[in-house]
Amino acid sequence: MDYRVSFDPATGSYLLKHNSGGLWIDEGTIQTLPSGIQISTITFPGNDAQFDSRLSSTGGSMALQNQKGEEKRITVSSATGKVDVK
């Protein structure tokens, strides 16, 4: 089954979805980042990190920033779907 995490940088929210017969179905409700954390950059196509059943993904990255300006970068490999946080 294919999954995607759809991010909304403007609101600091995200939503997990799964693909069912070509339609993306929400899994649960929209989640919001903790207070004081924002998405500072995002390179996922359409702001969606997508993972497929063949262990690959769309690839891309995003950076989360706190109120002190400190950042953590999350990178997803397109070849393996591996997620790396630095």
Image (cartoon, rainbow, N blue to C red):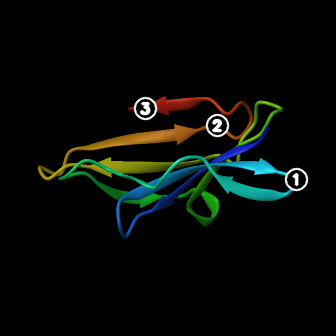
- Type of residue at label 3? Val
Residue found at x 35% / y 67%: 11
Dot 2 falls on a residue whose secondary structure is loop
Image quarter of the C terminus: top left
Q: Position of residue 6 (x, y in %)?
A: 56, 56
> Which residue, as the protein is rendered here, is positioned at the far right?
21
The amino acid type, in three-letter code, at marker 1 is Gly
Q: Name the residue furthest front.
A: 28
Classify 29 as above or below 3: below
Q: In this view, does 50 lie to the left or right of 55?
A: left
* Residue on which the image places disc 2: 77
Check disc 2: other Cα within 10 Å, few if <14, some if 14-19, many if 20+. some
Amino acid found under the numbered disc labelled 2: Ser
The circle on residue 30 is none
The answer to the question of whether label 2 and label 1 lie on touching residues, with beta carbons closer than 8 A, is no
Indicate the quadrant where residue 56 lies: top right
- For residue 63, above or below residue 41: above
Q: Of the residues tagged 3 and 1, which is closer to the observer?
A: 1
Nearest the viewer among 79 and 48 is 48
Q: Is residue 50 left or right of residue 29?
A: right
- Earlier in the chain: of badge 3 and badge 2, it is 2
- Say which element carries label 3: strand
Q: In which quarter of the image is the N terminus?
A: top right
Q: What element carries label 1?
A: loop
Above or below: residue 55 compared with residue 20: above
How far apart are labels 2 and 1 at the CA level? 25 Å
Label 3 – label 2 distance at C-alpha:
12 Å
Q: Name the residue under label 1.
A: 21
Instruction: List x then y, in percent, for residue 55.
Output: 76, 30
Per the rendering, the mark at residue 85 is: 3
Residue visible at 11% across and 49% down in the picture: 68
